[in-house]
Image (tube, rainbow, N blue to C red):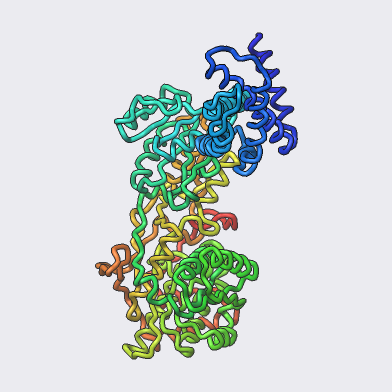
Amino acid sequence: MMQRVLAIAIVSSVGRLGALPRRTRQLIVAAMDGVLCAIAVWMAFSLRLGEFYRVETNVLLVAAAALVLWYPIASWRGVYRSIIRFSGARAMFGLGTAVVIYTMPMAVLFLANGFAGIPRTIALIQPIIFLTLMAVSRLTIRFVLIDIVNGHRADTARRVVAIYGAGSAGQQLALSLRHEPHVRLAAFIDDDARLAGQQLDGVTVHPATKLDALLDSNDIDEVLLALPSASRLRRKAIIEALQKHPVAVRSLPSVGNLIDGKVSVSDLRNVSIDDLLGRDPVRPNELLIGKTVTAKRVMVTGAGGSIGGELCRQILRSRPAELILLERSEYALYAIGVELDALADTLDVRVPIVPVLGDLGDSDAVQRIFEKRRPETVFHAAAYKHVPLVESNPIAGLRNNIFGTLNACLAAEKCGVRNFVLISTDKAVRPTNVMGASKRVCELILQGRAQLHGPRRDRTIFTMVRFGNVLGSSGSVVPRFQRQIREGGPVTLTHSDVTRYFMTIPEAAQLVIQAGAMAKGGEVFVLDMGEPVRILDLARSMIHLSGMSIRDEANPDGDIEICEVGLRPGEKLYEELLIGDNPEPTIHERILKANEAMISWAILQRTLDRMSMFLSRGDNVGATSLLSELVPEYRPAAGDSPLRVSDKAS
């Protein structure tokens, strides 16, 4: 009872002190150091003379001289700018440096000059005692603030965490956790068996081989991954092991994303889905990256989209002569323009960034834009990609995707663009929806134009790059699952057997640029997406990594339910990347070249003219019927559920 009363009194007193203005608190600490300085003088006399020395004139004289010397030096060295509750090794080093400087004039004053009744060695003994007293006082205050006050303020139901990784990042994170009153660090886990049984700041390090036993025998709520330099493959293995237990998982980002190598609780983030893919990105080939970009006038259509925006970021880093952003959405163009301006300042890149508001569906406007800006390389990322929306609005989808691409191709040829790269999709392969079929027609347009001009040296080199879903794109299934989990569920997926390919946006953009640099004309490049991911498994992993359990028949008391809502219009169970067989390797290990059938430009042009006529009349039946002529693999598939705008194709 007495301890509790004492703790309450301490908390109340510290709370009142904490409410004071910062300047007032600094003055209190300075006054405390003044008292300690005087005490250090008395202790120095007592130690030097071997008895408890009476406070006499000589003691007061030394104390006055010490205070006069200390405060200007302390002010110069910023001793009182440090926050005591965060005092660590650096703060102690700064304090020691100030005392060393303070010792010099003390030595000159009392060691070099003798004063009656004042031993010369006082000039050396007093600073040592003074430093010890100040260090102890600060560590005591820190202990009171962190271990007693924070412990008292915390709820009884504190979150119990374990840190996976006992290296420097893990140790820094542990220090940061000391300032979190609602968190208690229970254990370290590390792959290095040599650390097993050792303690870091009183917390035991457990071997990774005992992970299951540790999590089963302790009430650990969350595991924090402090492995910024670990490979994605290793992180994936650890995450899969943690999914067996009802613990939340958060992670520190990679070393490159940690500023100055410092680690704090604010750096923690939810485990990203690219960690679950377990595939490390391949270092980009700088020669390929720069071939069509560096010192070139580069245009990106659809610059405000997920892929278009990342292409712009990657291109800016390669220092083009000019970066032209073509976008039909005013806000998206404004947002990417502001971001790129800030990135250019950060990278100290002096590149003209030209925002152009325009619609590729307007052939005259497209021609004027290309003639005015004269791009040398074009990355064509503009398209409608939302499968259910395009399925419900085929006229708008066909006009934007097919004829926007056609207008851009013709304008590029007329204005002497050297390289034109189309961003395609795996949904163009044996499509079951209008969006996928329209993108396959876009590929046919580029193939047809490339064949029409043959090997002419002054021709535009047309090529296309095909890949699957990118993580974090607008409307992607991943942020939708995250939102549903935050809201308590249910998590909805269209079908339990749906699989999709996934790739991070930066990796996809880098590979697109490199593939474009390898083009000779008319190639269909396919990115190696790794293994397809089952969306049901993805949903389960995300629920487990949030520290929640799945509610189903086997576990009716679980937290989050997974609901199957049926395939939507035009949606496939699985996607493919190749129409034909036997893709050819290229000089890049993650870029393949597909051997796909094509249509001569004469035949393709006649069919496109007929489609344009149907679109101008608003005849979506006639327009979509021509898709089967151009894309024989196109097989429309009706979904089992009505369109919901909030859901993007998985």
x and y, in percent, of residue 543 in the image: 49, 40
x and y, in percent, of residue 417 in the image: 45, 85
Count of residue discs: 0
Up the image or down, 8 lies above or below 461; here it is above
x and y, in percent, of residue 112 in the image: 54, 34
Up the image or down, 20 lies above or below 499; here it is above
Q: Is residue 371 left or right of residue 284?
A: right
Residue at coordinates 59% horizontally, 75% vertically from top-left?
355
Direction top: furthest residue: 1
Residue at coordinates 42% horizontally, 28% vertically from top-left?
200
For the question of whether residue 22 can be seen, the reply is yes
Nearer to us in this view, 322 or 237: 322
Q: Is residue 86 left or right of residue 289?
A: right
For the question of whether residue 159 can be seen, the reply is no
Q: Is residue 9 left or right of residue 579?
A: right
x and y, in percent, of residue 500 in the image: 41, 55
Nearer to us in this view, 5 or 232: 5
Q: Quadrant of residue 86?
A: top right
The quarter of the rendered structure image containing the N terminus is: top right
Up the image or down, 492 lies above or below 500; here it is above
Nearer to us in this view, 17 or 589: 17
Residue at coordinates 49% horizontally, 30% vertically from top-left?
161
